[in-house]
Image (cartoon, rainbow, N blue to C red):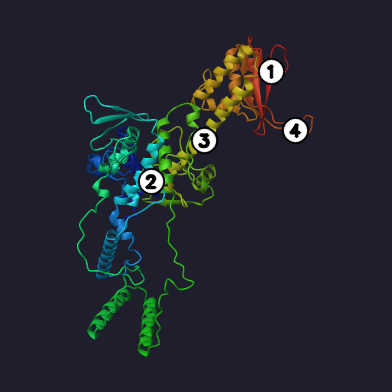
Amino acid sequence: MRSKPEFGKISSDDAVQIDACIHKLVYADSDISYETAHFASKGLCERIGNSGFFDYFEKNWHDCQDRWVMHRRADLPHFQNHTNNRLESFFGKLKDGVDGSKSMAVCVKTLVAYDRRVENEYRYRLARIGQFVHSGYDEEMANVLRFTTPYVAGKVAEEYAFALDRLETYTFLRDDEDGHILHVDGGKKSYVFRDDDWRCDCEFSVSMRLPCHHVIAFLKSASAEGPVIPWASIDERWTSPLRELKKVRQFSYERYSDKDAGREVLATMTQTQRYAEAHRVTQRIASELSDIDETDEFRRSLDFLEQQWRNFRQKTCEVATPREPGAQGWTPQKQRQKTVASEKEGRKWFDAAEAGRKTSGDVPLRRLSGVLVKFAEADAKKTKFKRMKNPVLIQDAFYILPAKLLDACMAVLPVANTEASAISVDEASQDAAPTAMVETIHIKDVGAFSRTQIETFKRCQNLKTAVQLGIDMHKWLSEEGLPSLPAQYHDLAREVARDVLESYPYKEVKGLSRMPDYKYTMLYRLTPPTWMTDAAIRACCERLVAGTGTCRFAGELTGRTMTKKTRSKDAVQVDVALRNRIMGYAKESAVESIFVPVNFMNAHWCCLVIKVQAKRI
């Protein structure tokens, strides 16, 4: 039930994006960062249709940021321990001895035994006679290690070494109002500490409750009496146990073995107990047999059970015992679920998507060219077309698929308009009636996308291709076109290059008629060796006609090459409408030239220029 979208199922790609957004909220370093991530999470939940999660977050988490947001916990003594799943960590050590097949009593016994063993081991370490030593510590650090733990001494040693290294860099100034307050300068930030309790407002001192390098550097530079590392600033957490342990009976320290941990001790069962257990099993088998509809299958199953009864009766049945884990040839295989992306990769994609959303809608080509292409490693994956009622789609896909994979998706999509639903240009457009089935493209190890998403990906891919042509044209104008022009045209060339870079690819070209092909994308193909389209030929002729009143554009003509240079009677004649148009232009007194572009084999172009006054072509 939970695998269906109507019950809250979302795609793995969208789940990774939500996880990355929550990670941004947890580790926000300022109010601005938190508000940015909060706004992003709201938009993300709305786009994927999971508004209930955002409502739950607003109700239960948004109003208590002091408990879980990092920048609001910076002043808390968290001792650099942000783990909040200690119970799960404790249970993780018991997985070797406890599993789902164990009874409740066995699980409780294992938990109690493990807790008792850990408590006894801790008491043994605490009551040992002796002290910790470290050959690399001097007298100051040896004294710290004497009444703390190696972990605490290691943290203090880092601050101690840093203080000795930055001793000449820091400057200390005593406050005028309060003589116990000292200001520390010389680093990236200024800090304040007191000389009565040696507490500093830096992150290390506040979070760890240990002497920081600012205090150690001050005591070292002032040559104060007593230890350089103030013992009074070491919190009692690091010097005394957290709780009083109850007395337990004496035991011998032995190495723990989990070989027999969690194994149930089989007790001797009475005949009544054995009959009750066997009756329970046979009732389950009988219930399954009664649900079989086919008679032949029921008979085969019944014969199989009767054969097993005969084997038990004659004691000829052998029960296969599972092989021990230590036996040779047995290798446990961990079943790992193949995911689309790891958590770190998901966070990178989330950051890239949010950066792209901030610049989306901007016209310059350099920003339009930065369209994300995801799943590049899945370029050769198989695609399947399905019509599904409630597919689990990737709703928040702020990227496009690789070109090869996208072409494969377009190839398996059926034609959207058939004979029954043909597009009529003359009739008024009507919204199509919604259908119950959704046309879905499923890509292995990637996810599922709808037809609308695939078509949007293709439009973005076409836009990205056009943008790349525009950037290439700007580069050609700046590096090759401008140096080849006379000096008086350099400013004009720079202006044209800047206009190409700052204009939207589908912006209409000024001075031409409003035709679908007269866009800036038409100009991008003027860069050699790119092939031009027929729109460029038509636009050139129209511009000449508009610029000079003595020229006319008759229209395009399709021609074919001849194998022989002799005239043939079977030659294709010129279209009557085109010929009449040319004859009409020729009769005008002000017309001097008539342009007739000719296309050969839908690839090559030439232009016939008819000189009316000179009567030649």
3D distance between C-alphas at marks 3 and 1: 38 Å
Residue at far bottom of view? 314
Mark 3 — residue?
Answer: 462
At label 3, which amino acid type do we have?
Asn
Q: Is residue 256 above or below residue 435?
A: below
Numbered disc in front, either 3 or 4 = 3
Q: Amino acid at mark 4?
A: Met
User: Eyeballing the image, is 538 above or below 208?
Assistant: above
Image marks 3 and 2: residues in contact by CB distance under 8 Å: no
Number of the front mark, 3 or 2: 2
Label 2 secondary element: loop
Label whose residue precedes the other's in the sequence (4 or 1): 4
Asked if residue 497 lies left or right of residue 172, the reply is: right
Quickly name the residue at label 2: 138
Q: Amino acid at mark 2?
A: Asp
Q: CA distance from mark 3 to mark 4?
A: 37 Å
How packed is label 1: few (under 14 Cα within 10 Å), some, or many (20 or more)? some
The percent position of residue 542, horizontal first and vertical second, equals 58, 19
Report the label total: 4
Q: Nearer the viewer, residue 325 or 532?
A: 325
